Amino acid sequence: STSSENIELIDGELSSRVFRLAIFFVEKDRTETRPKGEPVRRSEAAVDEALVEFTQTFRKVYIGEHAVATSKVYERLAERLGINDHMVVLDVMVSKIATNLHRYGGSEDYHVVAKSLSLLSDFSTGHSSGRLLGKLPTVRQMLSSHADDQYLFMSGPDSKMGRNRTLFYQTLTRILLSGIHDGEYDSERGFDAFMAPLDQKLDALSQITSDEMFASDPRVQVALCGVLRDLRGVVQACVMKKTYNNFFDWLYPKHVPLLIRAGNTFFALGISEVSNPLLKFFCELACNRPHRIVFDSSSPNGILLFRELSKLVIGFGNNTIAKWQQLSQNEVTDSYRIFYKNVSTCFNLFSNVLAGGYVNFGVFKLYQDPALDDAMRMIFQLIIAVPVGDLFSYPKLARTFFTLLEVLCSNHQAEIVALEHSLFVHIINAMIEGLQSMQVWMSTPCASAMDSLVDFIFRHSKKNSEITAKIREHIEQSPELFPQCLEVLFNLVFFEDNPNQWSLSRPLLGLILTNGDAFVTLEQSVLSSQTSAEERQILADAFEKLMSDIQPNLESRNRDKFAQNLSTFRQTVKSMNVMTMATSTG
Protein backbone atom coordinates (compact mmCIF):
# COMPACT_ATOMS: atom_id res chain seq x y z
CA SER A 1 0.00 0.00 0.00
CA THR A 2 1.01 3.64 -0.36
CA SER A 3 1.15 4.05 3.41
CA SER A 4 3.55 1.13 3.89
CA GLU A 5 5.71 2.36 1.00
CA ASN A 6 5.96 5.78 2.64
CA ILE A 7 6.97 4.16 5.91
CA GLU A 8 9.65 2.16 4.11
CA LEU A 9 10.97 5.33 2.44
CA ILE A 10 11.16 7.01 5.85
CA ASP A 11 12.94 3.92 7.22
CA GLY A 12 15.31 4.14 4.27
CA GLU A 13 16.04 7.78 5.00
CA LEU A 14 16.77 7.10 8.66
CA SER A 15 18.75 3.96 7.85
CA SER A 16 20.91 5.82 5.33
CA ARG A 17 21.98 8.25 8.05
CA VAL A 18 22.82 5.45 10.46
CA PHE A 19 24.76 3.45 7.87
CA ARG A 20 26.61 6.57 6.75
CA LEU A 21 27.79 6.87 10.35
CA ALA A 22 28.69 3.16 10.41
CA ILE A 23 30.69 3.50 7.18
CA PHE A 24 32.52 6.51 8.65
CA PHE A 25 33.51 4.52 11.74
CA VAL A 26 34.58 1.50 9.68
CA GLU A 27 36.85 3.66 7.52
CA LYS A 28 38.16 5.43 10.59
CA ASP A 29 38.98 2.14 12.27
CA ARG A 30 40.79 0.93 9.15
CA THR A 31 42.98 4.03 8.83
CA GLU A 32 43.71 4.77 12.49
CA THR A 33 46.32 2.81 14.39
CA ARG A 34 45.41 2.28 18.02
CA PRO A 35 47.69 0.71 20.65
CA LYS A 36 46.32 -2.72 21.56
CA GLY A 37 44.34 -2.61 24.77
CA GLU A 38 43.87 1.15 24.74
CA PRO A 39 40.65 1.93 26.63
CA VAL A 40 37.74 3.02 24.46
CA ARG A 41 35.97 6.20 25.46
CA ARG A 42 32.50 5.65 26.84
CA SER A 43 30.95 7.91 24.21
CA GLU A 44 32.42 5.77 21.42
CA ALA A 45 31.27 2.58 23.13
CA ALA A 46 27.74 3.98 23.43
CA VAL A 47 27.66 4.80 19.69
CA ASP A 48 29.04 1.36 18.74
CA GLU A 49 26.44 -0.37 20.91
CA ALA A 50 23.66 1.75 19.39
CA LEU A 51 24.81 0.91 15.85
CA VAL A 52 24.66 -2.81 16.63
CA GLU A 53 21.21 -2.52 18.20
CA PHE A 54 19.89 -0.57 15.21
CA THR A 55 21.27 -3.12 12.74
CA GLN A 56 19.72 -5.95 14.73
CA THR A 57 16.30 -4.34 14.27
CA PHE A 58 17.02 -3.56 10.60
CA ARG A 59 18.04 -7.20 10.03
CA LYS A 60 14.74 -8.55 11.26
CA VAL A 61 12.76 -6.53 8.72
CA TYR A 62 14.93 -5.68 5.74
CA ILE A 63 17.65 -8.28 5.28
CA GLY A 64 16.71 -11.15 2.99
CA GLU A 65 16.21 -11.74 -0.71
CA HIS A 66 12.48 -11.05 -0.54
CA ALA A 67 13.03 -7.77 1.31
CA VAL A 68 15.59 -6.61 -1.27
CA ALA A 69 13.23 -7.32 -4.13
CA THR A 70 10.17 -5.62 -2.68
CA SER A 71 11.27 -3.03 -0.12
CA LYS A 72 11.50 0.69 -0.85
CA VAL A 73 14.18 0.97 1.83
CA TYR A 74 16.90 -0.01 -0.61
CA GLU A 75 15.70 2.55 -3.14
CA ARG A 76 16.42 5.30 -0.64
CA LEU A 77 19.68 3.64 0.49
CA ALA A 78 20.78 3.48 -3.16
CA GLU A 79 19.99 7.17 -3.66
CA ARG A 80 21.80 8.32 -0.51
CA LEU A 81 24.69 5.85 -0.18
CA GLY A 82 24.78 3.69 -3.26
CA ILE A 83 23.69 0.64 -1.24
CA ASN A 84 21.63 -1.48 -3.61
CA ASP A 85 21.20 -4.68 -1.62
CA HIS A 86 21.77 -6.28 1.75
CA MET A 87 25.24 -7.59 0.82
CA VAL A 88 26.62 -4.06 1.23
CA VAL A 89 24.84 -3.69 4.57
CA LEU A 90 26.24 -7.06 5.66
CA ASP A 91 29.74 -6.04 4.62
CA VAL A 92 29.59 -2.76 6.50
CA MET A 93 28.15 -4.20 9.69
CA VAL A 94 30.31 -7.32 9.77
CA SER A 95 33.34 -5.06 9.41
CA LYS A 96 32.03 -3.02 12.35
CA ILE A 97 31.43 -6.18 14.38
CA ALA A 98 34.97 -7.36 13.69
CA THR A 99 36.33 -4.00 14.81
CA ASN A 100 34.27 -4.19 18.01
CA LEU A 101 35.67 -7.63 18.79
CA HIS A 102 39.20 -6.36 18.22
CA ARG A 103 38.78 -3.23 20.34
CA TYR A 104 36.62 -4.21 23.29
CA GLY A 105 37.73 -6.50 26.08
CA GLY A 106 37.23 -4.84 29.46
CA SER A 107 34.50 -5.84 31.86
CA GLU A 108 32.70 -2.55 31.18
CA ASP A 109 32.62 -3.44 27.46
CA TYR A 110 30.64 -6.64 27.95
CA HIS A 111 27.40 -5.41 26.37
CA VAL A 112 29.08 -4.13 23.20
CA VAL A 113 30.81 -7.49 22.67
CA ALA A 114 27.76 -9.59 23.57
CA LYS A 115 25.43 -7.65 21.26
CA SER A 116 27.98 -7.67 18.43
CA LEU A 117 28.36 -11.44 18.68
CA SER A 118 24.61 -11.91 18.93
CA LEU A 119 24.16 -9.91 15.71
CA LEU A 120 26.85 -11.91 13.91
CA SER A 121 25.24 -15.14 15.11
CA ASP A 122 21.81 -14.02 13.89
CA PHE A 123 23.31 -13.10 10.52
CA SER A 124 24.81 -16.60 10.29
CA THR A 125 21.52 -18.36 11.01
CA GLY A 126 19.51 -16.44 8.41
CA HIS A 127 18.77 -18.48 5.28
CA SER A 128 20.01 -15.80 2.91
CA SER A 129 22.48 -13.84 5.03
CA GLY A 130 24.07 -17.01 6.43
CA ARG A 131 25.02 -18.27 2.98
CA LEU A 132 26.42 -14.89 1.98
CA LEU A 133 28.54 -14.23 5.06
CA GLY A 134 31.28 -16.65 4.03
CA LYS A 135 31.88 -14.65 0.85
CA LEU A 136 32.81 -11.46 2.72
CA PRO A 137 36.56 -10.73 3.06
CA THR A 138 36.14 -9.78 6.72
CA VAL A 139 34.54 -13.12 7.55
CA ARG A 140 37.14 -15.04 5.58
CA GLN A 141 39.79 -13.24 7.62
CA MET A 142 38.00 -14.28 10.82
CA LEU A 143 37.91 -17.91 9.71
CA SER A 144 41.61 -17.96 8.88
CA SER A 145 42.81 -16.01 11.91
CA HIS A 146 40.91 -16.45 15.17
CA ALA A 147 43.63 -16.97 17.77
CA ASP A 148 43.35 -15.38 21.21
CA ASP A 149 45.72 -12.53 20.38
CA GLN A 150 43.54 -11.43 17.45
CA TYR A 151 40.51 -10.41 19.51
CA LEU A 152 40.75 -8.46 22.72
CA PHE A 153 37.55 -9.85 24.18
CA MET A 154 39.01 -13.39 24.17
CA SER A 155 41.50 -12.37 26.84
CA GLY A 156 39.02 -10.33 28.83
CA PRO A 157 37.75 -11.07 32.37
CA ASP A 158 36.78 -14.73 32.48
CA SER A 159 33.63 -14.23 34.49
CA LYS A 160 31.96 -12.38 31.59
CA MET A 161 33.98 -12.14 28.42
CA GLY A 162 35.04 -15.78 28.49
CA ARG A 163 31.47 -16.93 27.95
CA ASN A 164 31.28 -15.02 24.68
CA ARG A 165 33.94 -17.29 23.21
CA THR A 166 31.44 -20.13 22.90
CA LEU A 167 29.05 -18.04 20.80
CA PHE A 168 31.96 -16.69 18.72
CA TYR A 169 33.19 -20.17 17.79
CA GLN A 170 29.70 -21.53 17.29
CA THR A 171 29.06 -18.72 14.78
CA LEU A 172 32.38 -19.11 12.97
CA THR A 173 31.93 -22.88 12.72
CA ARG A 174 28.40 -22.49 11.41
CA ILE A 175 29.65 -20.12 8.68
CA LEU A 176 32.53 -22.45 7.84
CA LEU A 177 30.36 -25.55 7.57
CA SER A 178 27.79 -23.68 5.48
CA GLY A 179 30.60 -22.59 3.14
CA ILE A 180 31.97 -26.12 2.90
CA HIS A 181 28.48 -27.38 2.04
CA ASP A 182 28.13 -24.75 -0.71
CA GLY A 183 31.61 -25.44 -2.09
CA GLU A 184 33.09 -22.15 -0.89
CA TYR A 185 35.80 -23.92 1.11
CA ASP A 186 37.79 -27.10 0.69
CA SER A 187 35.70 -29.90 2.20
CA GLU A 188 38.80 -31.96 3.06
CA ARG A 189 41.15 -29.35 4.48
CA GLY A 190 38.80 -26.52 5.44
CA PHE A 191 37.77 -27.93 8.82
CA ASP A 192 41.27 -29.04 9.80
CA ALA A 193 42.71 -25.65 8.86
CA PHE A 194 40.05 -23.91 10.95
CA MET A 195 40.78 -26.16 13.94
CA ALA A 196 44.57 -25.71 13.71
CA PRO A 197 44.79 -22.91 16.36
CA LEU A 198 42.78 -25.04 18.82
CA ASP A 199 44.98 -28.02 17.95
CA GLN A 200 48.04 -25.99 18.83
CA LYS A 201 46.59 -24.84 22.16
CA LEU A 202 45.77 -28.40 23.23
CA ASP A 203 49.17 -29.66 22.07
CA ALA A 204 50.86 -26.97 24.16
CA LEU A 205 48.83 -27.92 27.23
CA SER A 206 49.63 -31.62 26.76
CA GLN A 207 53.34 -30.77 26.86
CA ILE A 208 53.01 -29.75 30.51
CA THR A 209 54.06 -32.98 32.18
CA SER A 210 54.33 -31.60 35.71
CA ASP A 211 51.04 -32.10 37.55
CA GLU A 212 52.04 -29.39 40.02
CA MET A 213 52.48 -26.80 37.25
CA PHE A 214 49.37 -28.03 35.50
CA ALA A 215 47.34 -27.50 38.65
CA SER A 216 48.88 -24.34 40.06
CA ASP A 217 49.82 -22.17 37.09
CA PRO A 218 46.98 -19.67 36.54
CA ARG A 219 47.99 -19.33 32.88
CA VAL A 220 47.19 -23.00 32.38
CA GLN A 221 43.75 -22.52 33.93
CA VAL A 222 43.02 -19.52 31.70
CA ALA A 223 44.21 -21.33 28.56
CA LEU A 224 42.24 -24.47 29.42
CA CYS A 225 39.01 -22.57 30.17
CA GLY A 226 39.36 -20.67 26.92
CA VAL A 227 39.91 -23.68 24.69
CA LEU A 228 37.09 -25.62 26.38
CA ARG A 229 34.65 -22.80 25.68
CA ASP A 230 35.91 -22.59 22.11
CA LEU A 231 35.45 -26.33 21.60
CA ARG A 232 31.96 -26.19 23.07
CA GLY A 233 31.03 -23.57 20.50
CA VAL A 234 32.46 -25.69 17.68
CA VAL A 235 30.58 -28.84 18.68
CA GLN A 236 27.33 -26.89 19.13
CA ALA A 237 27.53 -25.93 15.45
CA CYS A 238 28.15 -29.53 14.31
CA VAL A 239 24.50 -30.43 13.86
CA MET A 240 24.86 -32.96 11.04
CA LYS A 241 26.19 -36.52 11.14
CA LYS A 242 29.17 -35.77 8.89
CA THR A 243 30.25 -32.61 10.71
CA TYR A 244 29.89 -34.23 14.14
CA ASN A 245 31.93 -37.23 13.05
CA ASN A 246 34.61 -34.90 11.65
CA PHE A 247 34.83 -33.18 15.01
CA PHE A 248 34.83 -36.45 16.94
CA ASP A 249 37.63 -37.85 14.77
CA TRP A 250 39.60 -34.64 15.37
CA LEU A 251 39.08 -34.86 19.13
CA TYR A 252 39.40 -38.59 19.80
CA PRO A 253 41.75 -40.16 20.67
CA LYS A 254 44.35 -37.40 20.34
CA HIS A 255 43.02 -34.79 22.76
CA VAL A 256 40.62 -36.64 25.08
CA PRO A 257 43.33 -37.98 27.47
CA LEU A 258 44.44 -34.39 28.16
CA LEU A 259 40.87 -33.33 28.98
CA ILE A 260 40.29 -36.32 31.27
CA ARG A 261 43.57 -35.54 33.03
CA ALA A 262 42.50 -31.92 33.41
CA GLY A 263 39.19 -33.07 34.86
CA ASN A 264 40.79 -35.31 37.47
CA THR A 265 43.26 -32.57 38.41
CA PHE A 266 40.80 -29.73 38.86
CA PHE A 267 38.04 -31.93 40.33
CA ALA A 268 40.51 -32.92 43.06
CA LEU A 269 41.39 -29.28 43.69
CA GLY A 270 37.74 -28.23 43.70
CA ILE A 271 38.36 -25.43 41.18
CA SER A 272 34.86 -24.93 39.80
CA GLU A 273 35.99 -22.22 37.39
CA VAL A 274 37.75 -24.92 35.33
CA SER A 275 35.57 -27.92 36.18
CA ASN A 276 32.35 -26.36 34.91
CA PRO A 277 33.56 -25.43 31.39
CA LEU A 278 35.02 -28.95 31.12
CA LEU A 279 31.77 -30.64 32.15
CA LYS A 280 29.74 -28.34 29.89
CA PHE A 281 31.90 -29.20 26.90
CA PHE A 282 31.48 -32.94 27.43
CA CYS A 283 27.77 -32.37 28.09
CA GLU A 284 27.48 -30.78 24.65
CA LEU A 285 29.63 -33.50 23.08
CA ALA A 286 27.24 -36.16 24.44
CA CYS A 287 24.09 -34.33 23.34
CA ASN A 288 22.23 -35.93 20.43
CA ARG A 289 19.45 -33.36 20.28
CA PRO A 290 19.40 -32.88 16.47
CA HIS A 291 20.07 -36.63 15.97
CA ARG A 292 23.54 -35.80 14.76
CA ILE A 293 25.37 -38.66 16.52
CA VAL A 294 25.03 -41.60 14.18
CA PHE A 295 28.08 -43.84 14.12
CA ASP A 296 28.47 -46.56 11.50
CA SER A 297 27.38 -50.06 12.49
CA SER A 298 31.01 -51.22 12.47
CA SER A 299 32.21 -48.24 14.51
CA PRO A 300 33.01 -48.60 18.23
CA ASN A 301 32.83 -44.82 18.73
CA GLY A 302 29.62 -44.87 20.77
CA ILE A 303 31.14 -47.31 23.26
CA LEU A 304 34.43 -45.39 23.30
CA LEU A 305 32.66 -42.09 23.92
CA PHE A 306 30.70 -43.54 26.83
CA ARG A 307 33.85 -45.00 28.39
CA GLU A 308 35.49 -41.55 28.41
CA LEU A 309 32.36 -39.95 29.84
CA SER A 310 32.24 -42.68 32.48
CA LYS A 311 35.80 -41.83 33.54
CA LEU A 312 34.85 -38.16 33.77
CA VAL A 313 31.71 -38.79 35.85
CA ILE A 314 33.54 -41.15 38.23
CA GLY A 315 36.45 -38.75 38.65
CA PHE A 316 34.09 -35.86 39.30
CA GLY A 317 31.93 -37.82 41.75
CA ASN A 318 34.79 -39.27 43.78
CA ASN A 319 36.41 -35.88 44.34
CA THR A 320 33.25 -33.81 44.65
CA ILE A 321 31.37 -35.95 47.16
CA ALA A 322 34.42 -36.24 49.41
CA LYS A 323 34.98 -32.47 49.38
CA TRP A 324 31.30 -31.73 49.88
CA GLN A 325 31.14 -34.00 52.92
CA GLN A 326 34.08 -32.13 54.42
CA LEU A 327 32.58 -28.71 53.70
CA SER A 328 29.06 -29.64 54.84
CA GLN A 329 30.38 -30.14 58.36
CA ASN A 330 30.86 -26.38 58.45
CA GLU A 331 28.49 -23.62 57.39
CA VAL A 332 28.56 -23.27 53.60
CA THR A 333 27.54 -19.87 52.22
CA ASP A 334 27.49 -20.66 48.49
CA SER A 335 26.35 -24.24 48.02
CA TYR A 336 25.35 -23.73 44.41
CA ARG A 337 28.73 -22.44 43.21
CA ILE A 338 30.75 -24.91 45.26
CA PHE A 339 28.72 -28.07 44.68
CA TYR A 340 25.35 -27.92 42.96
CA LYS A 341 26.36 -26.05 39.79
CA ASN A 342 28.79 -28.76 38.69
CA VAL A 343 26.52 -31.54 39.95
CA SER A 344 23.71 -30.13 37.81
CA THR A 345 25.96 -30.11 34.74
CA CYS A 346 27.03 -33.70 35.52
CA PHE A 347 23.36 -34.77 35.72
CA ASN A 348 22.72 -33.10 32.38
CA LEU A 349 25.74 -34.81 30.84
CA PHE A 350 24.64 -38.26 31.99
CA SER A 351 21.06 -37.66 30.83
CA ASN A 352 22.37 -36.75 27.39
CA VAL A 353 24.43 -39.90 27.00
CA LEU A 354 21.74 -42.23 28.39
CA ALA A 355 19.07 -40.76 26.11
CA GLY A 356 21.35 -40.29 23.10
CA GLY A 357 20.57 -43.59 21.44
CA TYR A 358 24.11 -44.13 20.16
CA VAL A 359 25.34 -46.54 22.85
CA ASN A 360 24.23 -50.17 23.17
CA PHE A 361 24.44 -50.44 26.94
CA GLY A 362 23.89 -54.21 26.86
CA VAL A 363 27.42 -54.59 25.51
CA PHE A 364 28.94 -53.58 28.83
CA LYS A 365 27.27 -56.35 30.80
CA LEU A 366 27.80 -58.88 28.02
CA TYR A 367 31.55 -58.31 27.98
CA GLN A 368 31.83 -57.60 31.71
CA ASP A 369 32.93 -54.02 31.14
CA PRO A 370 32.41 -52.10 34.41
CA ALA A 371 32.15 -48.66 32.76
CA LEU A 372 28.34 -48.52 32.90
CA ASP A 373 27.95 -49.99 36.40
CA ASP A 374 30.67 -47.73 37.83
CA ALA A 375 29.16 -44.61 36.25
CA MET A 376 25.66 -45.58 37.43
CA ARG A 377 26.92 -46.18 40.95
CA MET A 378 28.51 -42.74 41.03
CA ILE A 379 25.46 -40.99 39.62
CA PHE A 380 23.26 -42.57 42.29
CA GLN A 381 25.72 -41.41 44.96
CA LEU A 382 25.41 -37.87 43.60
CA ILE A 383 21.61 -38.18 43.55
CA ILE A 384 21.41 -39.16 47.21
CA ALA A 385 23.90 -36.39 48.10
CA VAL A 386 21.28 -33.83 47.03
CA PRO A 387 18.61 -33.31 49.72
CA VAL A 388 15.12 -33.14 48.24
CA GLY A 389 14.51 -29.81 49.94
CA ASP A 390 17.46 -28.20 48.17
CA LEU A 391 15.97 -28.99 44.76
CA PHE A 392 13.36 -26.30 45.22
CA SER A 393 15.97 -23.73 46.19
CA TYR A 394 17.93 -24.19 42.94
CA PRO A 395 15.65 -24.48 39.87
CA LYS A 396 18.50 -25.26 37.45
CA LEU A 397 19.54 -28.17 39.64
CA ALA A 398 15.93 -29.38 39.93
CA ARG A 399 15.49 -29.33 36.15
CA THR A 400 18.53 -31.53 35.48
CA PHE A 401 17.78 -33.75 38.50
CA PHE A 402 14.25 -34.62 37.41
CA THR A 403 15.24 -34.94 33.74
CA LEU A 404 17.86 -37.49 34.81
CA LEU A 405 15.28 -39.40 36.86
CA GLU A 406 12.97 -39.48 33.84
CA VAL A 407 15.73 -40.91 31.63
CA LEU A 408 16.82 -43.46 34.25
CA CYS A 409 13.26 -44.65 34.86
CA SER A 410 12.57 -44.88 31.11
CA ASN A 411 15.58 -46.94 30.10
CA HIS A 412 17.24 -48.32 33.25
CA GLN A 413 14.43 -49.38 35.56
CA ALA A 414 16.26 -52.55 36.64
CA GLU A 415 19.12 -50.45 38.01
CA ILE A 416 16.64 -48.27 39.92
CA VAL A 417 14.90 -51.28 41.45
CA ALA A 418 18.21 -52.91 42.37
CA LEU A 419 19.26 -49.92 44.51
CA GLU A 420 19.59 -50.00 48.27
CA HIS A 421 16.26 -49.32 49.89
CA SER A 422 17.22 -45.92 51.32
CA LEU A 423 18.28 -44.63 47.90
CA PHE A 424 15.19 -46.11 46.24
CA VAL A 425 12.98 -44.32 48.79
CA HIS A 426 14.95 -41.09 48.26
CA ILE A 427 14.22 -41.22 44.53
CA ILE A 428 10.50 -41.96 44.98
CA ASN A 429 10.15 -39.20 47.58
CA ALA A 430 11.86 -36.78 45.21
CA MET A 431 9.31 -37.73 42.53
CA ILE A 432 6.44 -37.17 44.96
CA GLU A 433 7.73 -33.71 45.83
CA GLY A 434 8.23 -32.90 42.17
CA LEU A 435 4.70 -34.04 41.30
CA GLN A 436 3.27 -31.66 43.88
CA SER A 437 5.25 -28.67 42.67
CA MET A 438 3.44 -25.89 40.86
CA GLN A 439 5.96 -26.01 37.99
CA VAL A 440 4.97 -27.97 34.89
CA TRP A 441 8.62 -28.47 33.89
CA MET A 442 9.12 -30.25 37.20
CA SER A 443 5.94 -32.31 37.56
CA THR A 444 5.87 -33.57 33.94
CA PRO A 445 9.19 -35.47 34.02
CA CYS A 446 8.28 -36.80 37.48
CA ALA A 447 5.00 -38.17 36.12
CA SER A 448 6.79 -39.71 33.13
CA ALA A 449 9.39 -41.29 35.42
CA MET A 450 6.69 -42.66 37.72
CA ASP A 451 4.75 -44.07 34.78
CA SER A 452 7.80 -45.90 33.40
CA LEU A 453 8.79 -47.26 36.80
CA VAL A 454 5.27 -48.45 37.70
CA ASP A 455 4.92 -50.06 34.28
CA PHE A 456 8.16 -51.95 34.91
CA ILE A 457 7.03 -53.03 38.39
CA PHE A 458 3.67 -54.21 37.04
CA ARG A 459 5.28 -56.29 34.28
CA HIS A 460 7.60 -58.00 36.75
CA SER A 461 5.13 -58.37 39.63
CA LYS A 462 4.08 -61.91 38.65
CA LYS A 463 7.48 -63.16 37.56
CA ASN A 464 9.90 -65.17 39.64
CA SER A 465 13.18 -63.33 39.34
CA GLU A 466 15.76 -61.36 41.32
CA ILE A 467 14.11 -58.14 40.19
CA THR A 468 10.73 -59.32 41.47
CA ALA A 469 12.27 -60.24 44.82
CA LYS A 470 13.86 -56.79 45.06
CA ILE A 471 10.54 -55.10 44.27
CA ARG A 472 8.84 -57.08 47.03
CA GLU A 473 11.63 -56.19 49.43
CA HIS A 474 11.11 -52.46 48.78
CA ILE A 475 7.35 -52.78 49.24
CA GLU A 476 7.72 -54.77 52.45
CA GLN A 477 10.11 -52.23 53.96
CA SER A 478 8.01 -49.22 52.91
CA PRO A 479 4.45 -50.44 52.27
CA GLU A 480 3.13 -46.85 52.24
CA LEU A 481 5.45 -45.64 49.46
CA PHE A 482 3.44 -46.36 46.31
CA PRO A 483 0.02 -45.86 47.95
CA GLN A 484 1.31 -42.38 48.79
CA CYS A 485 2.18 -41.85 45.10
CA LEU A 486 -1.31 -42.99 44.16
CA GLU A 487 -2.90 -40.64 46.66
CA VAL A 488 -0.88 -37.63 45.50
CA LEU A 489 -1.61 -38.23 41.82
CA PHE A 490 -5.27 -38.97 42.54
CA ASN A 491 -5.69 -35.60 44.21
CA LEU A 492 -3.77 -33.77 41.48
CA VAL A 493 -5.71 -35.34 38.62
CA PHE A 494 -9.23 -35.29 40.04
CA PHE A 495 -9.34 -32.25 42.29
CA GLU A 496 -7.00 -29.73 40.65
CA ASP A 497 -6.75 -28.14 37.22
CA ASN A 498 -3.24 -28.58 35.90
CA PRO A 499 -1.97 -27.60 32.44
CA ASN A 500 -0.24 -30.99 32.17
CA GLN A 501 -3.28 -33.00 33.22
CA TRP A 502 -2.69 -35.76 30.66
CA SER A 503 0.92 -36.30 31.78
CA LEU A 504 -0.09 -36.49 35.44
CA SER A 505 -2.81 -39.04 34.68
CA ARG A 506 -0.52 -41.48 32.84
CA PRO A 507 0.85 -43.31 35.93
CA LEU A 508 -2.57 -43.66 37.56
CA LEU A 509 -3.69 -46.91 35.94
CA GLY A 510 -0.43 -48.65 36.75
CA LEU A 511 -0.58 -47.45 40.36
CA ILE A 512 -4.19 -48.61 40.70
CA LEU A 513 -3.41 -52.06 39.28
CA THR A 514 -0.37 -52.52 41.54
CA ASN A 515 -2.01 -51.02 44.64
CA GLY A 516 -5.59 -52.31 44.54
CA ASP A 517 -6.16 -52.22 48.28
CA ALA A 518 -4.82 -48.66 48.51
CA PHE A 519 -7.19 -47.59 45.73
CA VAL A 520 -10.17 -49.07 47.61
CA THR A 521 -9.08 -47.16 50.70
CA LEU A 522 -8.86 -43.94 48.66
CA GLU A 523 -12.33 -44.51 47.29
CA GLN A 524 -13.76 -45.02 50.76
CA SER A 525 -11.94 -41.92 52.03
CA VAL A 526 -13.39 -39.74 49.27
CA LEU A 527 -16.89 -41.13 49.74
CA SER A 528 -16.83 -40.67 53.51
CA SER A 529 -15.77 -37.03 53.11
CA GLN A 530 -19.01 -36.14 51.29
CA THR A 531 -21.80 -34.57 53.32
CA SER A 532 -24.91 -36.16 51.78
CA ALA A 533 -25.97 -39.70 50.91
CA GLU A 534 -26.97 -38.57 47.41
CA GLU A 535 -23.48 -37.23 46.71
CA ARG A 536 -21.91 -40.40 48.04
CA GLN A 537 -24.08 -42.54 45.76
CA ILE A 538 -23.31 -40.45 42.66
CA LEU A 539 -19.65 -40.59 43.44
CA ALA A 540 -19.75 -44.34 44.14
CA ASP A 541 -21.32 -44.86 40.71
CA ALA A 542 -18.59 -42.68 39.19
CA PHE A 543 -15.89 -44.81 40.84
CA GLU A 544 -17.51 -47.94 39.46
CA LYS A 545 -17.61 -46.47 35.95
CA LEU A 546 -13.97 -45.36 36.28
CA MET A 547 -12.84 -48.99 36.28
CA SER A 548 -15.60 -50.25 33.98
CA ASP A 549 -14.25 -52.46 31.14
CA ILE A 550 -10.68 -51.92 32.38
CA GLN A 551 -8.52 -55.03 32.06
CA PRO A 552 -5.60 -55.84 34.39
CA ASN A 553 -2.95 -54.82 31.86
CA LEU A 554 -1.15 -51.71 30.65
CA GLU A 555 -1.60 -52.17 26.91
CA SER A 556 -2.29 -49.06 24.83
CA ARG A 557 -5.94 -49.94 24.20
CA ASN A 558 -6.58 -50.45 27.90
CA ARG A 559 -4.81 -47.19 28.75
CA ASP A 560 -6.93 -45.31 26.21
CA LYS A 561 -10.13 -46.76 27.68
CA PHE A 562 -9.04 -45.75 31.17
CA ALA A 563 -8.28 -42.22 29.92
CA GLN A 564 -11.84 -41.96 28.58
CA ASN A 565 -13.31 -43.19 31.87
CA LEU A 566 -11.05 -40.83 33.78
CA SER A 567 -12.28 -37.84 31.77
CA THR A 568 -15.88 -38.76 32.60
CA PHE A 569 -15.01 -39.19 36.27
CA ARG A 570 -13.38 -35.73 36.38
CA GLN A 571 -16.45 -34.13 34.88
CA THR A 572 -18.59 -35.75 37.58
CA VAL A 573 -16.22 -34.59 40.31
CA LYS A 574 -16.14 -31.01 38.99
CA SER A 575 -19.93 -30.81 38.64
CA MET A 576 -20.38 -31.97 42.25
CA ASN A 577 -17.61 -29.76 43.67
CA VAL A 578 -16.30 -32.81 45.54
CA MET A 579 -14.11 -32.10 48.54
CA THR A 580 -10.52 -33.31 48.30
CA MET A 581 -9.48 -35.86 50.84
CA ALA A 582 -6.92 -35.06 53.49
CA THR A 583 -3.62 -36.34 52.18
CA SER A 584 -1.02 -38.00 54.28
CA THR A 585 1.83 -36.36 52.38
CA GLY A 586 3.71 -33.42 53.72
Image (spheres, grey):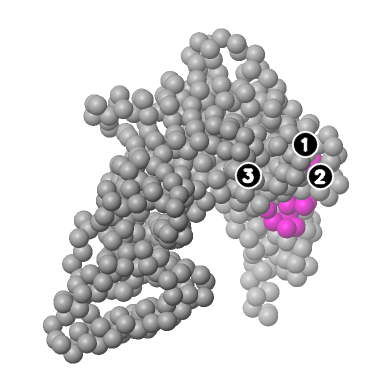
Which residue occupies 73% across, 54% down? 129
Residue position marked by numbered label 3 in the rendering:
360
User: Which amino acid type corresponds to the residue marked 2 in the rendered image?
Assistant: Ile
* Residue 233 as seen in the image, left or right of residue 403: right
Residue position marked by numbered label 1 in the rendering:
191
Quarter that holds the C terminus = bottom left
Please tell me in which quadrant of the rendered image residue 57 appears: bottom right
Label 1: how many residues lie within 10 Å, few (<14), some (14-19) or many (20+)? Answer: some
Q: Which label lies toward us, 3 or 1?
A: 3
Check whether the beta carbons of the residues at disc 1 and disc 2 lie within 8 A of each other. Answer: yes
Mark nearer the N terminus (3 vs 1) = 1
Q: Residue furthest left?
A: 531
Label 2: how many residues lie within 10 Å, few (<14), some (14-19) or many (20+)? Answer: some
Q: Which residues are magenta?
A: 125-139
* Residue 551 as seen in the image, left or right of residue 224: left
Please tell me in which quadrant of the rendered image residue 565 appears: bottom left
